[in-house]
Image (cartoon, rainbow, N blue to C red):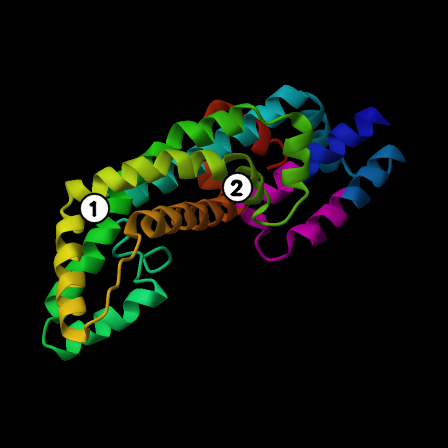
């Protein structure tokens, strides 16, 4: 029974990752894998399926979990690298940091007063701070992926298209926030966002006679964190569906077992 479960899991992994299976849902493919395994057990499968099962049986649980970890590391590193580049946040509509609700009146007031360029600069610099801070997440993600057990890997592979993202979010959110917050604070000063926003808020308060004092550090930190997980989720879907992620010998060995 243990051998059957192992073979079935490996079948599912290959089905989940192979780029040739995009036409049907992962759950349809899991069902098909179960049926194929039943046929194999009753010795009624064809020669091709038997050959594939033979290839799969040569893979160890260590290979399987190791391949998933490699795939996730690649996805995370590529996602964070993209976010950390210039305009990684600012020109990415999926993660671009806009103003919080309490500052949207500030933006609209500045634009009505002919100071739209100042508002644009303020938004750009918030995104620049996120781009500067986001690379702090790489070692934290790496540690979470390294500590992943085979049971964790199994749940991820049998889960939704963003099961790995949910796993990483649960394991890393608190650490990421602690790592991002001081970095964002430093980055806001580094890119000049603190000075620009001090100018923006001062002008707004003088015009409206209000006393707006936003916590930009907390807001940008939270938005940076949200942006990272949005990108990780996008990359995870690619890992599951795109054979191009087989960039190492282990990935090719495991995910190519049923090609």
Residue at the (78%, 38%) spot, across then down = 46
Q: Is residue 222 visible?
A: yes
The residue lying toward the viewer, choosing from 42 and 130, is: 130
Q: Position of 246 compared to 30: left or right?
A: left
Q: Helix, strand, or loop for circle 1?
A: loop
What number of labels is visible? 2
The residue lying toward the viewer, choosing from 56 and 187, is: 187
Real-space CA distance between mark 2 and mark 1, rounded to the nearest whole angstrom: 25 Å
Which badge, 2 or 1, is on the more N-terminal residue? 1
Q: What's the magenta region? A: 13-33
Marking on residue 169 = 2
Res 151 quadrant in image: top right
Q: Position of 127 compared to 146: left or right?
A: left
Image position of 207 with respect to 257: above or below: below
Instruction: Please tell me how crowded label 2 is: few (under 14), some (14-19), or many (20+) other residues with Cα within 10 Å.
Output: some
Provide residue 142's location: percent of width, then percent of height: 45, 27
The residue lying toward the viewer, choosing from 80 and 251, is: 80
The quadrant in which the N terminus is found is top right
Residue at the (57%, 33%) spot, across then down = 255
Q: Position of 155 compared to 211: left or right?
A: right
Disc nearest the viewer among 2 and 1 = 2
Instruction: Please tell me how crowded label 1 is: few (under 14), some (14-19), or many (20+) other residues with Cα within 10 Å.
Output: few
Q: Helix, strand, or loop for circle 2?
A: helix
Which residue in the protein does label 1 denote?
86
Residue at the (63%, 39%) spot, across then down = 156
Res 164 quadrant in image: top right
Image position of 142 with respect to 106: above or below: above
Q: Is residue 87 visible?
A: no
The quadrant in which the C terminus is found is top right
């Amino acid at each position: 029974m243990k051998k059957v479960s192992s073979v079935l899991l490996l079948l599912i992994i290959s089905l989940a990752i192979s780029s040739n299976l995009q036409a049907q849902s992962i759950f349809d493919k899991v069902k098909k894998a179960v049926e194929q395994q039943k046929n194999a057990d009753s010795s009624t499968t064809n020669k091709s399926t038997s050959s594939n099962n033979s290839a799969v049986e040569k893979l160890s649980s260590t290979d399987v979990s190791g391949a998933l970890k490699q795939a996730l590391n690649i996805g995370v590193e590529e996602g964070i690298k993209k976010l950390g580049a210039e305009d990684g946040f600012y020109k990415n509509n999926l993660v671009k940091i806009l103003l919080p609700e309490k500052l949207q009146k500030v933006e609209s007031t500045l634009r009505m007063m002919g100071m739209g360029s100042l508002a644009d600069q303020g938004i750009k610099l918030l995104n620049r701070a996120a781009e500067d801070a986001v690379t702090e997440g790489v070692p934290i993600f790496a540690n979470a992926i390294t500590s992943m057990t085979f049971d964790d890997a199994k749940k991820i592979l049998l889960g939704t298209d963003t099961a790995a993202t949910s796993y990483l979010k649960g394991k890393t959110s608190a650490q990421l926030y602690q790592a991002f917050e001081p970095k964002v604070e430093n980055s806001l000063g580094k890119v000049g966002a603190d000075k620009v926003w001090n100018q923006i808020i001062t002008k707004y308060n003088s015009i409206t006679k209000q006393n707006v004092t936003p916590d930009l550090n907390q807001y940008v930190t939270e938005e940076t964190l949200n942006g990272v997980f949005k990108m990780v989720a996008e990359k995870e879907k690619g890992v599951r569906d795109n054979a191009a992620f087989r960039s190492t010998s282990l990935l090719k060995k495991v995910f190519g077992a049923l090609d």
